[in-house]
Amino acid sequence: MPRGLNIIFSTADTQIVTLFQNVGLHSLRLGGGATLSDSGIDAQFTFQSALTNLQVIYQLPFDTIPDAVTIAQYIWTNYQSHNK
């Protein structure tokens, strides 16, 4: 992914917010080849707040278990109330 999640999923980008609202997307899958940094995760949850019907599914990098644990702990600690 050439751009970080904090750039792609920005609430300042009104066109992408409008696109998500108009298309009616209800889920977004992140991970796989994407690098999930703390700032990218923060930006994604801010973006998710703008789209109240959006559920995010994270695919963690299980090829490196310590990285997966770190990401999962960060999300759980900071965004537990967003998880269903």
Image (cartoon, rainbow, N blue to C red):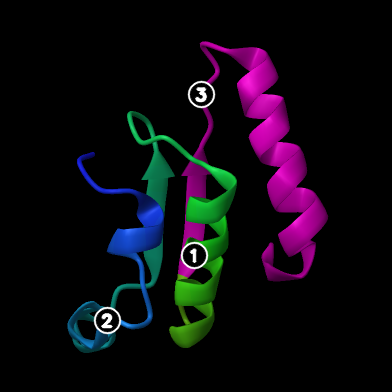
Crowd around label 1: few <14 · some 14–19 · many ≥20 (10 Å): many
What secondary structure is found at the residue carrying circle 2? loop
Residue 59: image location, x then y, percent: 48, 36
- Return the residue found at the far right: 77
Amino acid type shown at disc 1: Ala
Residue depicted at x 71% and y 31%:
70
Q: Nearer the viewer, mark 1 or mark 2?
A: 1
What secondary structure is found at the residue carrying circle 3? loop
Residue depicted at x 38% and y 72%:
26
Dot 1 or dot 2: first in sequence order is: 2
Q: Measure the alpha-carbon separation of dots 3 and 2.
A: 28 Å
Quadrant location of residue 66?
top right
Residue depicted at x 43% and y 83%:
51
Vertical position of residue 59 compared to residue 57: above or below: above
Crowd around label 3: few <14 · some 14–19 · many ≥20 (10 Å): some
Circle 2 is placed at which residue position? 24
Vertical position of residue 74 compared to residue 70: above or below: below
Q: Is residue 52 visible?
A: no
Q: Is residue 83 magenta?
A: yes
Amino acid type shown at disc 3: Pro
Q: Nearer the viewer, mark 3 or mark 2?
A: 3
Circle 3 is placed at which residue position? 61
Amino acid type shown at disc 2: Gly
Vertical position of residue 14 compared to residue 59: above or below: below
Is 46 left or right of 71, judged from the image as shown?
left
Circle 1 is placed at which residue position? 43
What secondary structure is found at the residue carrying circle 1? helix
Vertical position of residue 17 compared to residue 27: above or below: below
The quadrant of the picture occupied by the C terminus is: bottom right
The answer to which of 65 and 7 lies nearer the viewer is 7
